[in-house]
Image (cartoon, rainbow, N blue to C red):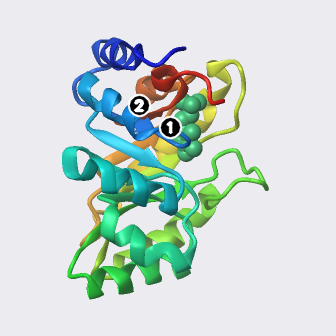
Amino acid sequence: MSFGHIKQNVERILEEIPDDVELVAAAKTRTHEEIREAIEGGVKIIGENYVQEAMGAFAAIGRAAKWHFIGHLQKNKAKKAVEVFDIIETVSSADLAEEIDRRSRAAGKVMPVLIEINSGREPQKFGVFPEQAFELVEVIAGFSNVKLAGLMTMGPFSGDPEDARPYFVETRKIFEKIKAKGLPGVEMRYLSMGMTNSYMVAIEEGANIIRVGTKIFGERG
Ligand SMILES: *Cc1c(COP(=O)(O)O)cnc(C)c1O
């Protein structure tokens, strides 16, 4: 898909999804011009997988969009991540949560985070297994400068979006259970699930954030 279609791609997706679902443009490897075109099309949130790449994009684009971190965050990048990102979607350990808390306090911020659930229990993927989620919820609830705002999951990749449904259903159940606990300082607002091939299924199963790369920008080179 050539440069020049990005704006229309975004417009088409925004027409298709309900108003209360937020579209994150997953921008790994894309140029600043491509990201700008997505914003022109109506994208309000940019998703970045790498802090270094995000710093460059952020320097060019700034607060014309919100920034979500959707990759694997290394502790030694937490300080920079706290400067740029509005939400960190991929917290999967107490250690990382503690480091984000410490860096956010130093920056005078409260950082909303999502816990990443490894719903497919895939050894090569990050995220906590479903049964480990509550332990991490309680840890995060104890911090003052990091605030739990929901869950994120990838699910195993498959060509068939229906294959993703059970993983989305399970993540939604965990989301509802955490929400029902009504823990102080925890506000379960966001359920981030679904990518190019699975976002409609994700929305059917309760996602209110979808992360789309290929369908906006074209195949990655
Ligand atoms: C790249 C990426 C996406 C988007 O994937 P596409 O299939 O290109 O839409 C979503 N979430 C994460 C975490 C990603 O790294």
Position of the N terminus, as image quadrant, is top right
Disc 1 marks a residue whose amino acid type is Arg
The x, y position of residue 180, in whole percent, is 33, 55
Secondary structure beneath label 2: helix
User: Do the numbered discs 2 and 1 sit on residues whose CB atoms are within 8 Å?
Assistant: yes
Q: Residues within 10 Å of mark 2 (few under 14, many from 20)?
A: some
Locate residue 39: give its quadrant: top left
Secondary structure beneath label 1: loop
Regarding ligand 1, which quadrant of the image does it lie in? top right
| Residue 148 visible in image | no
Locate residue 20: give its quadrant: top left
Locate residue 163: give its quadrant: top right
Per the model, the C-alpha gap separating discs 2 and 1 is 6 Å
**Closer to the camera in the image, 189 or 199:** 199
Number of numbered discs present?
2
The x, y position of residue 175, in whole percent, is 43, 50
Q: Residues within 10 Å of mark 1 (few under 14, many from 20)?
A: some
The x, y position of residue 4, in whole percent, is 40, 15
Disc 2 marks a residue whose amino acid type is Glu
Residue visible at 28% across and 47% down?
61
Q: Is residue 185 left or right of residue 200?
A: left
Residue identifier under label 2: 34
Residue identifier under label 1: 30
The x, y position of residue 212, in whole percent, is 47, 31
